[in-house]
Amino acid sequence: MASITADVWEGHDYLPRVFDDWLADPGAWFQAAELEGELVGVQRLRPIAAGVAWYEGLRVASSHRRQGLARAMLTAAAAQARGLGFRELRLATANPDAISLFQSAGFRLLVAPRVWRGRRLEGDEPARMPAPGDAGRLLATLQQDPAIAAYGGVLANGEWALDLDAELLRRLADEGALRVTAGGRALAAVRDSWDGDGLWAYFVSGSGAPLQDLLLALRFEADTLGMEGVNLWAPDGHPGEKDFAATGYDSESEPFRISYFALRL
């Protein structure tokens, strides 16, 4: 495994940290590619919703790249997912070479949010967490918000991309992963970052004063949790971009993006 991941993300690949858990997960399907007894590639499939599988962890050893192995592995994963009864394959990547591969294989882009960073801020209280019973009302409000279209109709947190519906909102509320302002006029879905140094707001809705209140409250929450700050993920053209800037969030001229794709099987 070390030989496959050593040069990924300048030696900061997350795969070695999760590899043992992946192998032990009975609800997922793990595939490895061998040539002459040498491990040269890995990938994984796992269910994330009815009929939808998540594809992740595609790695090919540097000594065997540019030989069609990644494409062959992707084809095998899609065939296995289809054989298991899944109707769609979804994934996330920030690798330009991988993006080219997935596009050429027929994957369609769902959303490609870029990151806006806000430093932690001492001050007021964190935002309110809605109750699971609020899911229907929150969905009705969200359905009137143009932010939904900007996100391609999905909530995507780096480990899955799921269609926005009342059941998903109910589950996230039950997990304590939603933040709202009074009346639900602005909403954020949040999670810890992989390195634990920041709060990820991977979906935000609303605009104007309600959204600005929420964005500041997220910075307050990061401070309360002892985190460095907030990584706010939003696609180009999000209706709240002016509010992001007004509340101390910055985006680089060439910002880091995560692209989410889907393939009908």
Image (tube, helix red, strand yellow):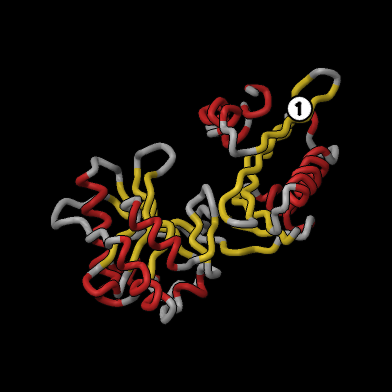
- For image coordinates 21% across by 53% down, the residue present is 220
Quadrant, the C terminus: bottom right
Quadrant, the N terminus: top right
Amino acid type, mark 1: Val
Image x and y of residue 39, in percent:
75, 23
Crowding near the residue tagged with mark 1, few <14, some 14–19, many ≥20 C-alpha atoms within 10 Å: many
Above or below: residue 51 compared with residue 207 = above
- For image coordinates 71% across by 48% down, the residue present is 97
Image x and y of residue 116, in percent:
40, 58
Residue ID for mark 1: 40
Q: Is residue 195 visible?
A: yes
- For image coordinates 27% across by 56% down, the residue present is 218
Q: Which quadrant of the view contains residue 263?
A: bottom right
Above or below: residue 143 compared with residue 250 = below
Nearer to us in this view, 252 or 91: 91
Q: Indicate left or right for 145 with 36 as reference.
A: left
Image x and y of residue 175, in percent:
35, 50
- For image coordinates 57% across by 27% down, the residue present is 24
Q: Indicate left or right for 9 with 155 as reference.
A: right
Q: Indicate left or right for 123 with 143 as reference.
A: left
Q: Is residue 116 visible?
A: no
Nearer to us in this view, 232 or 117: 232
